[in-house]
Amino acid sequence: MKLTLGYFHIKDVQFGPKTEVKDGVLYVNADEVVSKILEDNRLCKARVELARPGEKVRIIPVKDVVEPRYKVEGPGNVFPGFLGKVVTVGSGKTHVLKGVAVVTCGQIVAFQEGIIDMSGPGADYTPFSKTNNVVLVMDPKPGLEAHEHEAAVRLAGLKIASYLAEATKDMKPDEEKEYEFLPLPEALAKYPDLPKVAYVYMLQSQGLLHDTYVYGVDAKKILPSLISPTEVMDGAIVSGNCVSACDKNSTYVHQNNPIIEELYARHGKDFNFIGIVITNENVTLADKERSSDYAAKLIEMLGPDGVIISEEGFGNPDTDLMMNCAKVARKGIKVVLVTDEYAGQDGASQSLADAVPEADAVVTAGNANEVVTLPPMEKVIGYPEAANVIAGGWEGSLRPDGSIVTEIQAITGSTNELGFHTLTAKGY
């Protein structure tokens, strides 16, 4: 499979009479956007706001973040299973508005939603303070059930992301990058002297608004499967979950998975990147055993020398992470884990809910219980009172002056377990 991503580097976003890209600026027709959102009768009210890097703006509560992409050549549409019929994606040409994000916001669906500050100390913790954000503030019809509310705002985010990128369909990109993923026999033969590396990509699927979709199918319903990295880039995996904001993989993060990008960057140089196994995170022991057994079997069939395993979420999924680790390692394959920690506000508590002896190489994305004070902003998009109920906050987190005291758990992407954030470590 061969996918070409055509990048349009966007420096600013503004409202305009026509949705278009001109001289590095995305102009957005707000009326058209609202009209498209309200085609879904589950939503009764919508507005569009803009938030740019460095502005004294807070967005709360954030549900999902999506990068605008539009398929201009090849089969299917971006976000298959949600936009258009289900066709295998990951080949052809797709346009990308780099530097832009669609952020979905509005009345809270579930308590695990997030905060994006565009400036101040909070901006240092979220990658989405660096993007030009088109914020969709959407309210459901009264009495709408929570799952339907989440589904409606999820679909709106995907639809508007595609609509914005469609404005470039007849334009030449500023830059193009080509990604190819070969059939396994060819992949193994191409770099026979390099160590073979595969990736186990864990998807949040615990239910109760902790869901991820693969080609429109809830991941809890799948067995572990092989997937091309180019399919992931083309929107085959979509977030539908309200897991804690700090470590949820927003759709934007799936589209730009940094583990996949790093594996591609070093492919053919340091190692041979031979495949991805996606797997789910379950709530019953039987389901955990089934999925971890199956994921380990698929990895064994690929035959790598080493495997990276990334988690999404914490607590219950720590057991899935450790099962995957132990079962792959016991096949004689080296394993590196990527996770984050919930070590308490003082950093002294147990970091993970589970552990196995095989987990001897772990990359941490930070302690989500770290407490920060976010100063008041000149403008708040959304509902600031959500700070008192979202995960990481507590009653009184929102202070009378508009500042917020919270754990970084409440900041969107602050400890993302794919490494899509700004935290780092220093050696001494």
Image (cartoon, rainbow, N blue to C red):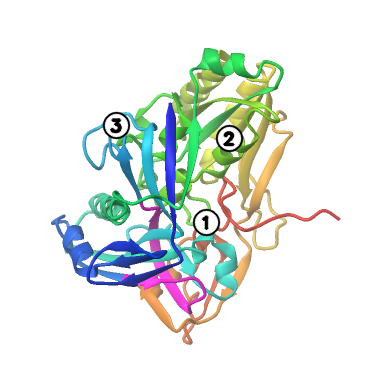
Q: Which of 143/141 is in front?
A: 141
- First-in-chain label (3 vs 2): 3
Q: Nearer the viewer, mark 1 or mark 3?
A: 3
Eyeballing the image, is 398 above or below 366?
Answer: below
Q: Nearer the viewer, mark 2 or mark 1?
A: 2
Q: Which residue is mark 3?
A: 75
Q: Which residue is mark 1?
A: 413
Where does the magenta region start and end? 49-68
The residue at the point 21 percent across, 34 percent down is 85
- Please state which amino acid type lies under the numbered disc 1: Gly
Instruction: Identify the residue shown where x is 19% and y is 64%.
Output: 32
Please state if 132 lies on the left or on the right of 124 as rendered. left
**Disc 3 to disc 2, how far (Cα)?**
23 Å
Q: Amino acid at mark 3?
A: Pro
Task: Let me know if residue 61 is in the magenta part.
Answer: yes
**Residue receiving disc 2:** 264
User: What main secondary structure does the magenta stretch of the protein show?
Assistant: strand
